[in-house]
Image (spheres, grey):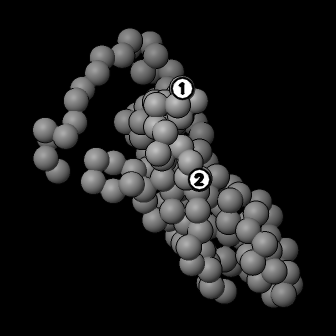
Amino acid sequence: MPMDKYRGISLQKELVGTIENYINTHPEMGYKSLADFVTDAIREKCEKLGIFTVESALPSLEHFNISEQGVRVLDRTLGNGTARGRIIDVYFKPEKVLCEYCDSSSCRHVQFALSIPAVQKIVQEKGWRIKE
């Protein structure tokens, strides 16, 4: 990736340590690195301040493909300088739902997928008792 699209920032060591500890002890949140967490936090703050006027009208999570095997979710919070989001696959299993990105069955992608009426219908028709 071209490095001219990125800029570094300095953060206090204590703050970085606290955030890294949180990321390591809460893998269900889906953050893979300090950069992921900081990017998400900055985007959230910018949305609240109205800095991202065009993008703020779009939902951060949106599904665009559903099948009996799973859901493809667009996560706009995982965008970068090139892409405006990342496609996340959430798979259905008889005993659980699994997010391939977070490697979790209880992250925000799974919660979003299970909130979709079409997904609820598929799960119900199959008679699955999925625990979140």
Which residue is at the far front? 54
Residue 95 can be seen, yes or no: no
Q: Could you say which quadrant of the image residue 12 lies in?
A: top left
Q: At 42% across and 40% down in the image, what residue appears?
A: 36
Dot 1 alpha-carbon crowd within 10 angstroms: few under 14, some 14 to 19, many 20 or more: few
Q: Is residue 60 above or below residue 87?
A: above
Q: Is residue 113 above or below residue 6?
A: below
Q: At 58% across and 30% down in the image, what residue appears?
A: 48
Left or right: residue 78 compared with residue 6: right
Q: Is residue 102 above or below residue 122?
A: above
Q: Which residue is mark 1?
A: 49
Mark-to-mark CA distance, 2 and 1: 16 Å
Q: Which mark is first along the chain, 1 or 2?
A: 1
Is label 1 in a helix, a strand or a loop?
Answer: helix
Q: Nearer the viewer, residue 85 or 124?
A: 85
Q: Is residue 21 above or below residue 82?
A: above
Q: Nearer the viewer, residue 129 or 59?
A: 59
Q: Could you say which quadrant of the image residue 68 lies in?
A: bottom right
Residue 85: horizontal and vertical position, in percent?
A: 42, 56
Q: At 14% across and 40% down in the image, what residue appears?
A: 3
Say which amino acid is labelled 2: Pro
Q: Which mark is residue 59?
A: 2
Say which amino acid is labelled 1: Leu
Q: Quadrant of the C terminus?
A: bottom right
Is label 2 in a helix, a strand or a loop?
Answer: loop
Left or right: residue 48 compared with residue 112: left
Left or right: residue 86 compared with residue 67: left
Residue 91 can be seen, yes or no: yes
Residue 123: horizontal and vertical position, in percent?
A: 79, 79
Residue 107: horizontal and vertical position, in percent?
A: 64, 53
Q: At 30% across and 17% down in the image, what residue appears?
A: 10
Give the total number of marks visible in the rendering.
Answer: 2
